[in-house]
Amino acid sequence: MSFSFFDSSTYDGTTEDIACDAYHKYKEDVQLMVDIGLVAYRFSISWSRLIPILTLRCHYLSIWKRTCQPEGVTIYNNLIDELISHGVHPHVILYHCDLPQALEDEYVGWLSRKIVKDFTAFTDARFKEFGDRVLHWTTMNEANILALGGYGNGLIPPNRCSAPFRSNCTGGNWSTEVYIVGHNMLLAHSSAVRLYKRKYKQGFVGISVYGSAYLPYLNSEADVMAVQLALDFYIGWFIEPLIFGDYPQIMKKNAGSRLPRFSKSESELVKGSLDFIGLNHYNQVYAKDNPTSLEEDLRDFTMDTGVEILRMNLQCLPSQCCLCQVESHHYLFLVFFWKVLLSRRWFKLLEAPRSIRVPSSFHLVKGGNSSSDIAFN
């Protein structure tokens, strides 16, 4: 929430104090869900709202022995009960750009390994409070975007980036921090999943990543390969460690020592630590081969890919059905990603631990602020 008070962080200076006012309008919101026939609702539970952290000296053993703030628990209990009473399944996001400011001040948040214990302890509090009614949990919403947007281009909290790639940020190093944060997120996710499987067991825990449909800019071998590189860096970055326990080889080659390595025990912890994969999707983009970016001595994440991403504009003539084009676009993406699963090693997630299953159909859940959320569960 602190991020919304920066002068340039929102278009018109609006803060998150009230926003859409779900705090007071949750009953109206649920009725709207019923009216349009939703069967599931995905929402996040705020870390600071549930367990306020008012001190800069935050230590694992002292913080998490405190009880949750009653007012915070009550509002989420009310929402969950309202959803269930109307036949709508609650699907909880455990983290969505809302790191307590105190943890950012104490050890720079996701840049520190300390976050793994704190995140695990907080997820434990949520599992304990709401796990009797919530069976589906997403540890992080768009984990790859949390790392890229927060510590790469600085467009989302905590607004970290660096020159010469981007300026006007609170600090940062795009060349290294994106990889460090992604690594710590994977460790925190897997730690939370291990805790849930050991202590609670009855539900399903997964993670959400963002994915565009990557199409070759030209019908050339180089641009077809660029599509594979984009998949490895933007999606495989998180999916491959969760399935195989390690990053894609091309990432390790291009990023070199800037990409952290998993120890043997960490690899075993991360591998198979999911019951489903959530995929948030907004658009199709072109992938264009850009090998010259790898020749630079100082590179950021996007330069390490060796790919130039070009946006595809959806335009409609007055006589055309724009909505039809949008729906067709989403359907084509589902077909695209399903083919990716079939054609790449990722399909081996069927053989990963804990009976991870990929269904013959997709389940679309409208929720959050994404145009579609496809859960493989």
Image (tube, rainbow, N blue to C red):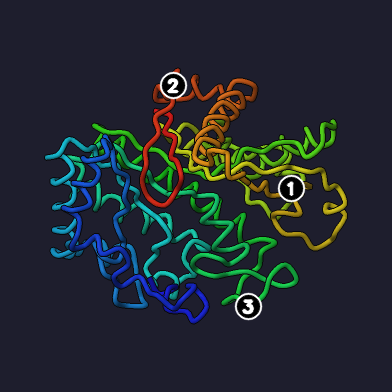
Instruction: Please identify the quarter of the rendering in which residue 4 is found.
Output: bottom left
| Disc marking residue 51 | none
Task: Tell me which label, 1 or 3, sits earlier in the chain.
Answer: 3
- Check the image and name the residue furthest to the bottom: 7
Mark 1 residue crowding within 10 angstroms, few (<14) / some (14–19) / many (20+): many
Q: Return the residue at label 1.
A: 305
Nearer mark to the viewer, of 2 and 1: 2
The residue drawn where x is 30% and y is 60% is 46
The residue drawn where x is 40% and y is 45% is 191
| Disc marking residue 168 | 3
Task: Tell me which label, 3 or 2, sits earlier in the chain.
Answer: 3
- Quote the CA–CA distance across marks 2 and 1: 31 Å
The residue drawn where x is 31% and y is 35% is 197
Amino acid type shown at disc 2: Ser
Residue 336, horizontal then vertical, whole percent = 60, 28
| Relative vertical location of residue 83 with respect to residue 292 in this rendering, above or below | above
Question: Nearest the camera: 184 or 70?
Answer: 70
- Quote the CA–CA distance across marks 3 and 2: 44 Å
Q: Return the residue at label 2.
A: 361
Amino acid type shown at disc 3: Asn
| Relative vertical location of residue 230 with respect to residue 69 in this rendering, above or below | above
The residue drawn where x is 49% and y is 40% is 323
Amino acid type shown at disc 1: Thr
Nearer mark to the viewer, of 3 and 2: 2
Residue 25, horizontal then vertical, whole percent = 19, 59
Question: Nearest the camera: 7 or 119?
Answer: 7
Instruction: Please identify the quarter of the rendering in which residue 341 is found.
Output: top right
Instruction: Please identify the quarter of the rendering in which residue 354 is found.
Output: top left
Q: In the structure shown, which secondary structural element does the residue marked by tag 1 occupy?
A: helix
- Quote the CA–CA distance across marks 1 and 3: 24 Å
Question: Taking 336 as reference, is 199 left or right?
Answer: left
